[in-house]
Image (cartoon, rainbow, N blue to C red):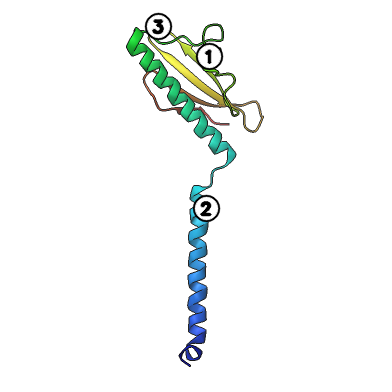
Amino acid sequence: MFFWKYRDQLHQAGVVIGLVVLMYVLLIYQFTYRTPEDAERERARIMLQRIAALQHAYRAEYGTYLPIDEKTNGRILQLNNAPGRFRYRVTVSEDDFMAYAEADFDRDGKAEVWVVDARESEPVLKHGD
């Protein structure tokens, strides 16, 4: 008998609670969903951080940065065979290095370029796609 008396109010409260739960689910999805491009960017960021860590460790041990090119050690590091759409290259001078990750997601000829160097170990976006 009690439920029949307040049936409409309980129904309205249930609808409101349902809408609030739906909003929370949509917000959680919005903040946790990553596009394939975002996953590629994260992979490139981690790869650049690892290159920077390798360069700093090599410099600490040998006093110079590790020259990375196809002839000497590019195949060992497999920069050209790294998974994903980003391509990597590293330029080294006596007291500096720069590592680049480049990808053209929309194939318009303009690549998105992320860079890390001897002074900054966190990758920085230089050019957006």
Which residue does the image show at 47% across and 29% down from the upper left? 46
x and y, in percent, of residue 98 in the image:
45, 17
Can residue 105 be seen from the camera position used here? Answer: yes
- Disc 3 to disc 1, how far (Cα)? 22 Å
Which numbered circle lies on residue 76?
Answer: 1
Q: Circle 3 is placed at which residue position?
A: 94
Going from N to C along the chain, the mark reached first, 1 or 2, is 2
Q: Residues within 10 Å of mark 2 (few under 14, many from 20)?
A: few
Judged by depth in the image, the label closer to the viewer, 3 or 1, is 1
- The amino acid type, in three-letter code, at marker 3 is Glu
Going from N to C along the chain, the mark reached first, 3 or 1, is 1
- Disc 2 to disc 3, how far (Cα)? 47 Å
x and y, in percent, of residue 50 in the image:
44, 24
Say what secondary structure mark 2 lies in. helix
Asked if marks 2 and 3 touch (Cβ < 8 Å), the reply is no
Q: Circle 2 is placed at which residue position?
A: 29
